[in-house]
Amino acid sequence: MKKFLALLLALVMVFALAACGEAETEETTPAGEETTPAGEGTEELGYIGISMPTQSLERWNRDGSYLDQQFQAAGYKTMLTFANNETDQQVNDIQNMIADGVDLLVISAIDGMALNTVMDEAGTAGIPVIAYDRLINNDNVNYYVSFDNYSVGQLQGEFLVEALDLENAEGPFNIEFTAGDPADNNAPFFFNGAMDVLKPYLESGKLVCVSEQTDFDVVATDAWDTDTALARAQNILASYYADGTQLDAWLCSNDSTALGVTQAIQSDYAGDNTVWITGQDGDEANLKNIVDGMQSMTVYKAVANEAVATLDIAKAILAGDPVDQALIDNAGWDFEANLDTETYTTSDSGHAATSVLLVPTTVTTENFEEVLVAPGYYEVGEDGYLHATQN
Ligand code: BGC
């Protein structure tokens, strides 16, 4: 079965690549190929600028290539850039796209507040923007495609409630917190989702944060950086746990930060009990840690589906069709998504981006075969660990 799926996936990729080739050559040979309906060259279908934050964090490589492939296979011309986690670079990338005449922008912001000027420029040029995964705080941004960020945090919190059996066990259990980049609009959503689940137990004393560091601003990690998360975790372990105090859980908002925390626990925590550690993304290094029992879970977000949703929304926008519940109902997606027109406000004026939010899934050793391997996102390598089938 696994071999069959791998073969199927390989075939799909071969066809997708062939389709990309067609779309690219379509500019010089505007014949009526299937991906580019007769009479419509690539230019007529549209030119899409795709700006991703960085290649240094695993998932964005996947997002970038899925988006690029999806749009090209559908007959669009694309420009794909990665901004090396540097805001100035991202502004520059987007300005180049505008100057090059893109019809629509798909942007995952490094800093949701720092793209104001360039979003105003896009607005003036009449270029619609889809904020991809991370919201951009500018009222010219009318569309947002993401996973339900608050529910990512809820899943992490609920996982810990169950793992520690907080409803029944006597406790108290000791917990620490590591959140994401304050410049990323998603980060507080993840943190609040988890905190809202865990707060009652912190208030009742069943959960104790020994360091007392429970505010987002204090536990945040600039640029979601693994080494930054590692250094802070080492600090906390040295200051509060070196005397043999038991640590039971560490809420980490994503995998890059969980990687640092896990490293710190391996090297700097002397206790021999299980420390439950959460994550998000299904990065390969973290899935390895999950298989090896060093991380407990990750929240998986199938970014391939996020790219499919983005393509269909872009098509609707370019065709002048509404992005609404009917679009979601009729899209024929084999994944769940919900329309939200209130939560993601782009400024204090209350303007909210029309948001299509996909549904994330908890992954543990119990279900990774079913959630990750069976649909073809990952395969189990000869080393016994999970490897993404596409990067
Ligand atoms: C994404 C996460 C990711 C994080 C760091 C967030 O905006 O939603 O999936 O872990 O950025 O790259």
Image (cartoon, rainbow, N blue to C red):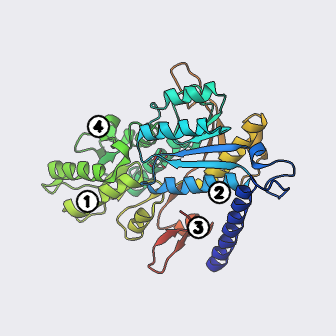
Percent across and percent down for residue 340 are 63, 35
Instruction: Write down the residue under mark 3.
Output: 370
Instruction: Write down the residue under mark 4.
Output: 218
Question: 246 and 220: which one is in front?
Answer: 220
Cα distance between the residues tagged 2 and 4? 39 Å
Q: Residue furthest left?
A: 243
Cα distance between the residues tagged 1 and 2? 39 Å
Tell me the element at label 2.
helix
Cα distance between the residues tagged 3 and 2? 25 Å
Instruction: Write down the residue under mark 1.
Output: 265
Judge depth for marks 3 and 2 and give the one in front: 2
Toward which corner of the image does residue 245 lie, by quadrant? bottom left
In the rendered image, the quadrant that contains the N terminus is: bottom right
Percent across and percent down for residue 254 are 42, 51
Tell me the element at label 1.
helix
Cα distance between the residues tagged 4 and 1? 20 Å
Q: Amino acid at mark 4?
A: Val
Graded by Cα atoms within 10 Å as few (under 14), some (14 to 19) or many (20 or more), the crowding at tag 2 reads many
Left or right of 60, for residue 228: left
Percent across and percent down for residue 353 are 61, 31
Cα distance between the residues tagged 4 and 3? 37 Å
Left or right of 36, for residue 279: left
Considering only order in the chain, which callout, 3 or 4, is on the residue closer to the N terminus?
Answer: 4
Q: Amino acid at mark 3?
A: Glu
Q: Are marks 4 and 3 in contact (CB under 8 Å)?
A: no
Considering only order in the chain, which callout, 2 or 3, is on the residue closer to the N terminus?
Answer: 2
Is 115 drawn above or below residue 292 in the view shown? above
Q: Amino acid at mark 2?
A: Gln
Left or right of 283, for residue 101: right
Q: Amino acid at mark 1?
A: Ile
